Amino acid sequence: MTRPFYPFRTSLAALAILALPACAGTYTGPVEVTRFVAENPVGLGEGNITLTFPREITNEIARAAFADAVAGELESLGYTLVMERGSGVQEAAISTSRGPIERFDRRGPVTVGGGASTGSFGSGVGLGVGINLGGGDGRPELVSELSVRITTDTGETLWEGRSELPTSVNSPYSEIGASAQALAAALFQDFPGGNGETVQVSVDELERTP
């Protein structure tokens, strides 16, 4: 099978890098990551894999940013990205959301086989378009989230994880490209991770990671 082409990869990576300089009075992170690993994850981290979005993201820039970020991480693990499902092809189901931090309070963790939370960037909340939720004095105001579930071609869940990044609206990581790169990098750091573990990863640590 041929490797799919992701036309936004170079431009989005550049966007993430350009967005990194900090602004005064901003709040960023850390990224909180929760992961679950199946008891017998045969084939995890190798072979062919395709990307899917269980709930369509209406914002095309956001869709491209998260597809690009997750694809890059999966390739670095040893996967080969393909465009279509098929025999022996694993599936990485991507879900994303962003909203006011209050919306994410007191929510339960993801569980393997139970389904990661889903959402949409199509509502226009956040996305670096000047949405003002008040504050701006270094308090967390938004939470950006990425969830990925990896399954076999028969639907068996091998791995599932969720990463969340709280920021102020003026944080450079409230931008789509930067948040997608940070969330994906944290989610797949030290893959597959411990079953049921929750860890925190600073964005400074992610910037230092080659």
Image (cartoon, rainbow, N blue to C red):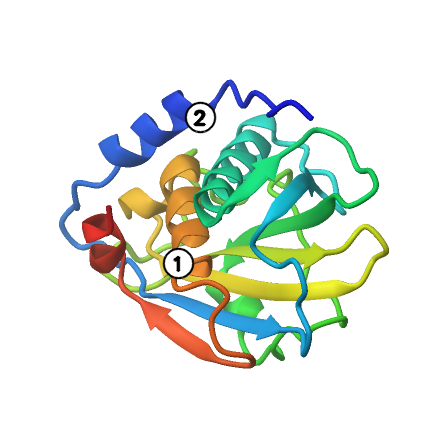
Q: Nearer the viewer, residue 137 or 143?
A: 143
Residue, x 37% and y 50% (percent of image)?
Answer: 182
Return the disc, 2 or 1, that comes first in the chain's sequence. Answer: 2
State the image coordinates of residue 146 (x, y, percent, origin top left). Answer: 54, 54
Q: Nearer the viewer, residue 189 or 104?
A: 189
Q: Nearer the viewer, residue 108 or 100?
A: 108
Q: For mark 1, what is the residue?
A: 186
Residue, x 67% and y 79% (percent of image)?
Answer: 39
Q: Nearer the viewer, residue 97 or 75?
A: 75
Q: Along the horizontal axis of the image, is 34 left or right of 37?
A: left
Q: Looking at the image, is 122 positioned above or below residue 28?
A: above
Identify residue type, mark 2: Arg
Residue, x 47% and y 64% (percent of image)?
Answer: 101
Q: How dense is the environment of label 1, judged by Cα within 10 Å: few (below 14), some, or many (20 and up)?
A: many
State the image coordinates of residue 157 (x, y, percent, origin top left). Answer: 74, 64
**Figure quadrant of residue 159:** bottom right
Label ID, residue 23: none
- Evaluate whether residue 137 shows in this view: no
Label ID, residue 9: 2
Q: Looking at the image, is 105 positioned above or below residue 70?
A: below
State the image coordinates of residue 59 (x, y, percent, origin top left). Answer: 61, 31
